[in-house]
Image (cartoon, rainbow, N blue to C red):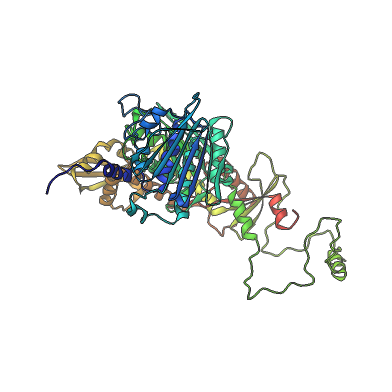
Amino acid sequence: MTIRRLPETLVNRIAAGEVVERPAAAVKELVENALDAGATRIDVVVRDGGRSLIAVTDDGCGMKGDELELAVERHATSKLPGEDLLNIATLGFRGEALPSIGAVSRMTITSRAKGADSAWCISVEGGAKGRVAPASHPQGTRIEVRDLFYATPARLKFLKQPRTEFDHAVDAVERLAMAHPGVSFSVSGDARTPIRLSASQGELLDARLTRLGALMGREFSDNAIPVVAERGAVNLTGHIGLPTLNRPTARHQYLFVNGRPVRDKLLVGAVRGAYADFLARDRHPMLALFLDIHPEEVDVNVHPAKAEVRFRDSALVRGLIVGALRHALAQAGHRASNTVGAATLDAFAPRTESPAFAQAPSRYDFQYAPAGARSSHIPRDLAEAVSSFQAPLTGFTSQPSARPATAMPPIAEEAPSPDHPLGAARAQLHNTYIVAQTGDGIVIVDQHAAHERLVYERFKQALVDGGVKRQGLLIPEVVELDEPSAARLVARADELAELGLVLEPFGDGCVVVREFPALLGKADIKGLVRDLADELAELGDALSLRERLDAVCSTMACHGSVRAGRSLNQDEMNALLRQMEATPHSGQCNHGRPTYVELKLSDIERLFGRR
């Protein structure tokens, strides 16, 4: 078989498959180019899921005629002034996007440079470049991509439905819009305009929250906690949702490195570690985090899609994220998301009856009417009956009637203090739920869930103050591993010893465990060590051991907390409320469920039709 050089057009199409795997990837590359050009407004049009048309228009710096001709050549770029691939300060740098898109579509670029008196255009069809010609266009650039993948028909077979491809394109623009709140964005196509964002004003942190609220919903902006942290030359900013605002998937977690949206295992693992004490394994928080780091400390040239990065000091980055998120959650105190109250109101909403059991409207049905207003559809005899029903009962005295033996003793009236966010205890229902009155509503507390969190936090503090108690092994446990795994464990032996696990090297590919955390009880030492080795290889941190210690603390807290069904007096209930106010994270139990529900007077009035 003879070796031959592939034609240039075929080489370009093969390369295009790495950069443009679907229409959303083309949209992402074109919008990134617009952002690198300094655009303040970007308009995107996607039709037929991107198959028939993708158009991106911006008001950036534009290109001259000679630059336009060079822009569609492979590996031609203005974003890499030198030859240092470790110092990349722009979203794009390879010079692959435009030639790759032009190799599999019919592409037209029209651009006018800043200060130029005329615009220029060029066409590329299936990799064949046309001539530069004069055109009419305002300052900026417009790129039209038609018949995407017509030159590679096999790729068309793997595309999803147009609606699905359109949604992927919208998601790509949303991620870039989050990182650049000072830029206006719009996305339209097929009679839909899902994105229309104006530039956010004010400080960067506030502008980002405004943009995040527009894209992630008001419930996120209302329940978001700001994050600002710095360690060395690494800065972390953003907003994270309260633990009680969670989702079944990680779809609403947005992570950025130097303004670039990424999907990185290290960052995802750090987020999981930060929320480990507050959420179940199958629940995920909502958040948007922006990591700014010197370009030489991160490698973005890992994959053509530029969605993966590598950090020079991954331990520093992970430690910064975990510490900053836990500190922000601690600052939130006992706060829980207001979505808990909304879910409670939804639970009170009347259920819709099925058609089989629905009854015909009665002639006595009526609606609420403002005080003093007449309702013409209320029968007169019904109005008179209602009036007599509301009249004071005859023979009623002001003295309270005899109480059943099982009722709680009367509680002295005490005005709720504004210094007490959770109010003053008024009653206990079913020996499980505490009802407290606040200045503008009521609070219902699950006494077991609340006390479980309080006890759990005490256990964790005891671990910090006194260290983890160790249990020595009469016969040391020898664990066989492969040599790289054993070396990773030995290199972190000092850190593991702080967590109560004392191990030493024992020949090639083996370690010997002499002590382990006493909290773990009868643990599978070999399984624990092997899990630690696997996680050290993937995340570079002893996460499994920390999670196991937390799980033991959680179990102990559950058994040592106030049980449901236990009667509490008023002093005990108020003491529990005050401890919740003074304890971080008390708004949710160890499994992410809310410990209390707050209803404002306005919410209660809506339940009774007063609003």
- Give the image location of residue 490, x and y in percent: 23, 38
Left or right of residue 51, residue 355 in this image: right
Farthest residue toward the bottom? 356
Q: Nearer the viewer, residue 77 or 285?
A: 77
Task: Check the image and report above or below for 546 versus 90.
Answer: below
Which of the 4 image quarters holds residue 565?
bottom right
Residue appearing at x 36%, y 32% in the figure: 93
Residue appearing at x 61%, y 50% in the figure: 573
Q: Nearer the viewer, residue 375 or 3?
A: 3
Left or right of residue 298, residue 456 in this image: right
- Give the image location of residue 561, x and y in percent: 50, 52
| Figure label count | 0
Q: Nearer the viewer, residue 420 or 532?
A: 532
Left or right of residue 536, residue 334 in this image: right
Residue appearing at x 64%, y 42% in the figure: 421
- Give the image location of residue 531, x and y in percent: 29, 48
Which of the 4 image quarters holds residue 25?
top left
- Give the image location of residue 257, x and y in percent: 41, 35
Residue 282 seen: yes
Which of the 4 image quarters holds residue 389?
bottom right
Q: Nearer the viewer, residue 434 or 85?
A: 85
Residue appearing at x 22%, y 43% in the figure: 6
Residue 273 seen: no
